[in-house]
Image (cartoon, helix red, strand yellow):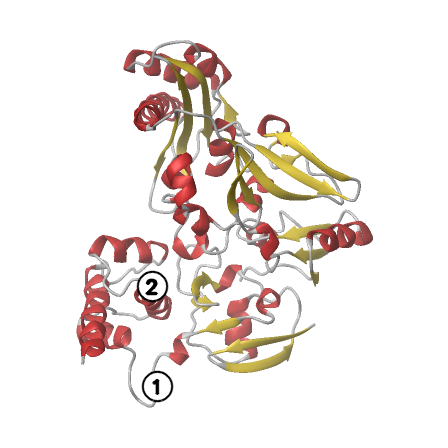
Amino acid sequence: MQTPGPIQYERATSVQNAIELLEKYGPETRILAGGHSLLPMMKLRLANPERLIDINDLDELSYIREVDGEVRIGAMTRHRELLESELLARQFPIFIDAEQMIADPPVRNRGTIGGSLAQADAAEDLSAVCSALKASVVIVGSDGERVVSMDDFHVGPFMTAIQDGQVLTEVRLPVRPRSGSAHEKVERRAGDFAIVAVSAALWLEGGSIADAGVALSAAGATTIHARRSEELLRGKEPSEELFAEAGGLAAEDCSPIADGRGPVDYKRHLAGVLTRRALSRAAERASNQEG
Amino acid sequence: MEITVTVNGERVTRDIEPALLLVHFLRDTLGLTGTHWGCDTSNCGACVVHLDGRPVKSCTTLAASCDGHEVRTIESMEVDGRLDPVQQGFHEEHGLQCGFCTPGMIMTARALLDENPDPSEAEIRTAISGAICRCTGYANIVRAVRWAAEHESAEARR
């Protein structure tokens, strides 16, 4: 029987209140969002917080809206809301690709985007999605808020830039014209973590690629940001050959480990193939988008 | 800590340990053992109940988080000896053998039909993708949910 160890529990009444409670109780206090990463970690004693601050009732952190050229997503927005969002389907269909394959519907009813990113699990999909989209996150503490890029947010395996007394409140996605995005994932069975997954985004200008985002899940100790693939793509005309070459670079630049989901050479092969496929679909979507 | 949860339409107040999981609150604190406790890891779906109308895995939800919220379990499905159409569908179409997954399956299916009264086979299979059955091969479960959908819509037309 797996149950969390003894804890103290308090429910935050606002983001400010959550920050006050974190400061009052100190570093052994954790924020409880959807709980689908933290509670399993607590059952396994991989996380042993003394106290949880529950933010599940903070409706103020549940939204998806377009503001000042960005799509802003509240940290407590649940997977289900991401999957059902018309705004995301239109602007960033990569979310729909990913959400259809993240866990299962009951889990998606609880798990949140903020919780997923804050867990910083390299096998988790939304971190790669946000990295490919060049997202930034908003972290709030008693001394104000700061906006941090995904590269600076994930500082190591299961480690983020969120410090004691701070709360992740929002994800920001820049909206640029003629963009397309896609997520490709191969899993052993429905709802499992990826064997490897790849997120890709392209921004077109004229006949060529103005900017590109490529990131990989479950292909290393952290989410892999495939910078060399992105550099290769910039300024070039989209083509299957180019995407295959970008896939080859991503396969070289990731660092998967052999485990029950497969050996290293297979995972590298997948990384290359999925990168090519994700870029190809992203390009198709970008060329279909008006603007 | 003290929590008040509306369970199957009835407000209950209990003193609990904050670490108590919803599945154990239902089974051990309230004696509602219809909700099954399976894998402990949010994989199997045997523990699915409705929280504010949405199916969730009660093994991965703190009872404390349900304070002030509404929970619905399998015990609420049959009313005055009359089975819910989903239960009747499982009976008619042999949607179970050992029955261990059945409470979670039925609550998952009930939530689907509440939102989508006429789901396709693919939609049913997606909805129950977080619920594992080791007996039926799922074919009869899908038929059971379709049976419920067809009989509910027939009832609604009457």
Task: Tell me which chain the residue with mark 2 is part of.
Answer: B
Can you give x and y, in whole percent of width and height, for residue A40 in the image? Answer: 55, 52
- Residue A166: numbered disc: none
Q: Amino acid at mark 2?
A: Glu
* Callout 1: chain: B
Q: Residue at x 27, y 73 (%)?
A: B86
Are labels 2 and 1 on one chain?
Answer: yes
Note whether A241 is above or below A47 in the view shown.
Answer: above
Residue denoted by label 1: B79
- Residue sitting at 23 percent across and 71 percent down? B148
Residue A34's place in the image compared with A225, above or below, is below
Query: Could you say where residue A140 lies in the image, as x and y percent from the top left?
Result: 71, 42
| Mark 1: amino acid | Val
Quarter holding residue A209? top left
Q: CA distance from mark 2 to mark 1?
A: 21 Å
The residue tagged with tag 2: helix, strand or loop?
helix
Residue depicted at x 42% and y 9%: A235
**Direction from residue B147 to residue A56 in the image, left or right:** right
Q: Nearer the viewer, residue B123 or B30?
A: B123
The front one of A89 and B152 is A89
User: Which residue is disc 2 drawn over?
Assistant: B115
Find the residue positioned furthest to the bottom.
Answer: B80
Judge whether residue A92 can be spotted in this image.
Answer: no
On-image quarter of the C terminus of chain B: bottom left
**Which one is in front, B58 or A6?**
B58
Upstream in sequence: badge 2 or badge 1: 1
In which quadrant of the rendered view does residue A9 lie? Answer: bottom right
Counting every numbered tag in the picture gives: 2
Q: Nearer the viewer, residue A1 or A13?
A: A13
Q: Is residue B44 above or below residue A201?
A: below
In the rendered image, residue A162, in percent from the top left (x then y), is placed at 69, 38
